[in-house]
Image (cartoon, rainbow, N blue to C red):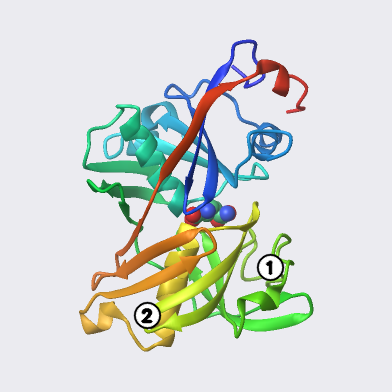
């Protein structure tokens, strides 16, 4: 079935620290979501509005996740607002797990979610905060420079399953209102594009950031971005839990809220933050009937 079929299609809208998502439950993977349809749904004026879309599919029903079905019943088929595909979304996976639990599709407690960036284990605590085991960061040694509006900064290349360039700046306002378009970054290092974080210090192991998300523009939060920032800040500060054996925690403030990131001695990075469902309804088939696929 295409999403412009005649019967209404259920959707929800949710956010994690104001990184907001259209959620399309589709356990049997029967709904086609070409990039043009995703882009229309994510358009906040012409559609539902979102920084991305969470297509909720059983792993067994999706060719990219079938091999993971024994480990994780559900697959987060994540799309950016422009319809492009990304490996992982940290805020999205919290919202995804919250949706599964709210819908009664999983038990309370721990949930495994398959993503293109591997299976993520998610813990939902009684107060509602959600902790995700995000995996390990990879820090290639490339020297990267990012440029916005004629100013350039050196950046740290961090891969959290998806690519990031983390730049420490003097003032978050230096990028002005220019983060809706991709900052310049070297395509030789990032052939598939990159998420770019601008970071300032707020105190000991406490930073604040803005982000340009690949495929979505400037957003009010990025979970993988916050993890990349915490790891880059730790290395800058001379802290590496995989060497010292002591976990390191950073508080990361974003325009849409706060995330707490801990890197453990085995390299595993845990991210804790909220997840909220704000609405649910049905898409009007007429809305999308004219979207070219
Ligand atoms: N908002 C996300 C990241 C979504 C994917 C990203 N735009 C990409 O293309 O890699 C997060 O919370 O991690």
Q: Position of residue 170 (x, y in %)?
A: 60, 85
Residue under label 1, please give it: 187
Q: Which mark is residue 205?
A: 2
Q: Position of residue 285 (x, y in %)?
A: 66, 17
Which residue is pictured at 65% across the width and 18% down the height? 284
Q: Quadrant of the C terminus?
A: top right
Image: 121 above or below 45: below
User: Can residue 116 be seen?
Assistant: no
Q: Position of residue 232 (x, y in %)?
A: 45, 77
Query: Horizontal placement of 80 versus 74: left or right?
Result: right
Which residue is pictured at 39% across the width and 47% down the height? 94
Q: Position of residue 221 (x, y in %)?
A: 52, 58
Q: In terms of image quadrants, where is residue 57? A: top left
Secondary structure under badge 1? loop
Q: Residues within 10 Å of mark 1 (few under 14, many from 20)?
A: few
Q: Which mark is residue 137?
A: none
Which residue is pictured at 61% across the width and 76% down the height? 172
């Amino acid at each position: 079935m295409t999403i412009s079929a005649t019967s209404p299609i259920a959707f929800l809208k949710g956010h994690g620290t104001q990184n907001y998502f259209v959620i399309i439950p589709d356990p049997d993977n029967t709904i086609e979501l070409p990039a043009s349809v995703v882009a229309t749904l994510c358009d906040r004026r012409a559609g539902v509005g979102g920084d991305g879309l969470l297509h909720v599919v059983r792993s067994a029903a999706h060719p990219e996740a079938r091999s993971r079905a024994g480990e994780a019943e559900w697959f987060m088929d994540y799309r950016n607002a422009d319809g492009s595909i990304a490996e992982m979304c940290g805020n999205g996976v919290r919202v995804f797990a919250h949706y599964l639990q709210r819908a009664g599709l999983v038990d309370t407690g721990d949930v495994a979610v398959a993503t293109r960036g591997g299976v993520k284990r998610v813990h939902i605590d009684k107060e509602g905060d959600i902790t995700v085991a995000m995996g390990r960061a990879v820090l290639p040694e490339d020297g990267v420079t990012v440029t916005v509006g004629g100013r350039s900064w050196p950046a740290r290349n961090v891969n959290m399953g998806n690519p990031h360039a983390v730049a420490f700046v003097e003032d978050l306002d230096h990028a002005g209102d220019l983060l809706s378009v991709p900052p310049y970054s070297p395509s030789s290092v990032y052939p598939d594009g990159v998420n770019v974080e601008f970071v300032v210090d707020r105190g000991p192991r406490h930073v604040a950031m803005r982000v340009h998300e690949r495929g979505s523009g400037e957003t009010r939060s990025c979970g993988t971005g916050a993890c990349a920032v915490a790891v880059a800040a730790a290395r800058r500060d001379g802290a590496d839990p995989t060497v010292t054996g002591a976990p390191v925690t950073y508080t990361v403030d974003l325009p849409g809220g706060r995330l707490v990131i801990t890197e453990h001695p085995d390299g595993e990075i845990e991210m804790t933050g909220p997840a909220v469902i704000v609405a649910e309804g049905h898409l009007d088939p007429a809305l999308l009937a004219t979207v070219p696929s």
